[in-house]
């Protein structure tokens, strides 16, 4: 009987060991969880790119002075997830204004061909992004693949002319590194993270 059980135990042990290794010691059971762990453990340098904002002005992606930059990826005609994420972004903006935390927030369009400055301005007005603390901007078309890869943003065209995409808040720290990812509705966690860095 013992002879029959041993191979099963051995296979189970190997399987558990593989699972333990593949999930980063049981911490990352999804690719999204793995992405978030990776950002914290191995922050990635962000290139000094310029974006065109909703006023047709060039704005830096990297933090300026002692600020931190929060980035979300959107397309302006998104009818569902982007609207919810924008409402969460607005709440974070309101809370940060009260606290006086030096932060700049950018909703970056991954649909730069259709998201013209005029279209981005409509989106910004709808969500009270006035270009001060929070603006809407688009990368140069040639820079878009680099940004999506750097931040691990998945964008898949759908059959209705829109996109399926993951939504999150990406933190670019004062050293110019992509160093944290939060759910768009993890407002308290984002605020705590920023206040800890600012203290």
Image (spheres, grey):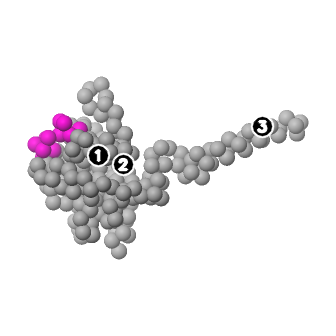
Marks 3 and 2 close (CB-CB < 8 Å): no
Task: Please state the extent of the stretch shown in magenta in the rendering.
Answer: 111-122
Dot 2: few (<14), some (14–19), or many (≥20) neighbours within 10 Å?
A: many
Q: Give the secondary structure at mark 2.
A: loop
Crowd rating for badge 1 (residues with CA inside 10 Å; few <14, some 14–19, many 20+): many
Which is nearer the N-term, disc 2 or disc 1? 1
- In this figure, which residue is indicated by the disc labeled 2? 151
Name the secondary structure under disc 3: helix
Q: Position of residue 136 (x, y in %)?
A: 19, 49
Q: Nearer the viewer, residue 163 or 88?
A: 163
User: Does dot 1 land on a helix, a strand or a loop?
Assistant: strand
Find the distance from the CA under tag 3 to the CA under tag 2: 41 Å
Residue visible at 11% across and 49% down in the picture: 56
Residue identified by numbered label 3: 8
Q: CB of mark 2 within 8 Å of CB of mark 1?
A: yes
Q: CA distance from mark 1 to mark 3?
A: 47 Å
């Amino acid at each position: 009987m013992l002879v029959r059980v041993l191979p099963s135990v051995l296979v189970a042990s190997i399987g558990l060991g593989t699972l333990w290794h593949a999930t980063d010691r049981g911490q990352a059971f999804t690719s999204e969880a793995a992405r978030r762990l990776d950002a914290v453990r191995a922050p990635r340098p962000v290139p000094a790119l310029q974006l065109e904002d909703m006023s047709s002005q060039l704005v830096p992606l990297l933090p300026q002075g002692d600020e931190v930059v929060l980035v979300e990826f959107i397309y302006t005609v998104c009818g569902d997830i982007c609207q919810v994420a924008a409402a969460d972004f607005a709440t974070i903006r309101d809370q940060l204004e009260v606290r006086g935390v030096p932060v700049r927030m950018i909703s970056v369009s991954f649909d730069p061909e259709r998201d013209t400055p005029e279209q981005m301005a409509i989106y910004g007005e709808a969500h009270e992004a006035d270009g001060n603390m929070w603006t809407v901007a688009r990368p140069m078309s040639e820079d878009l693949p680099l940004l999506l890869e750097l931040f691990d943003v998945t964008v898949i065209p759908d059959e209705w002319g829109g996109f399926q995409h993951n939504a999150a808040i990406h933190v670019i720290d004062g050293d110019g590194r992509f160093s944290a990812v939060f759910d768009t509705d993890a407002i308290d966690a984002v605020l705590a993270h920023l206040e800890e860095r600012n203290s």
